[in-house]
Image (spheres, rainbow, N blue to C red):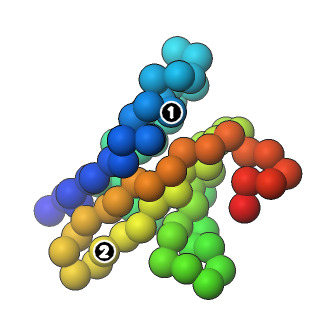
Amino acid sequence: MGWTLRIARRVEKALQKLPARDREVLAAAVQSLAENPFSGDIVRLKGSLVWRRRVGNYRIFFEVHLDTRVVDVEDLRRRTSTTY
């Protein structure tokens, strides 16, 4: 059984503004969270319920609700020295 994926509006907008190549890779990475949110290069951020998945120079921030099997994709940012 898969996971339900809820994508924040700001993530959808951020994806639309990216170059086509990056958009395709990141959209596929976001969709793969519905199959298994714990695969790939992920780390739970200290002091919060938010997880981070690294995809190239970008970071996908999401929460996982184990009881309801829901993944909330909350943010998408390009990696900089102040991303975290």
Task: Identify the secondary structure beneath mark 2.
Answer: strand
Residue in the picture at 23% in, 60% down = 3
Q: Is residue 31 left or right of residue 45?
A: left
Amino acid at pointer 2 = His
Circle 1 residues within 10 Å: few <14, some 14–19, many ≥20: few
Instruction: Tell me the tag on residue 65.
Output: 2
What percent of the width, then of the height, locates residue 4? 21, 57
Question: Amino acid under label 1?
Answer: Ala
Any mark on residue 14, and which?
Answer: 1
Let me know if residue 84 appears in the view.
Answer: yes
Circles 1 and 2, Cβ within 8 Å, touching? The answer is no
Give the quadrant of residue 52: bottom right
Foreground residue, 14 or 59? 14
**Front label number (1 vs 2):** 1
The number of callouts visible is: 2
The quarter of the displayed image where residue 64 is located: bottom left
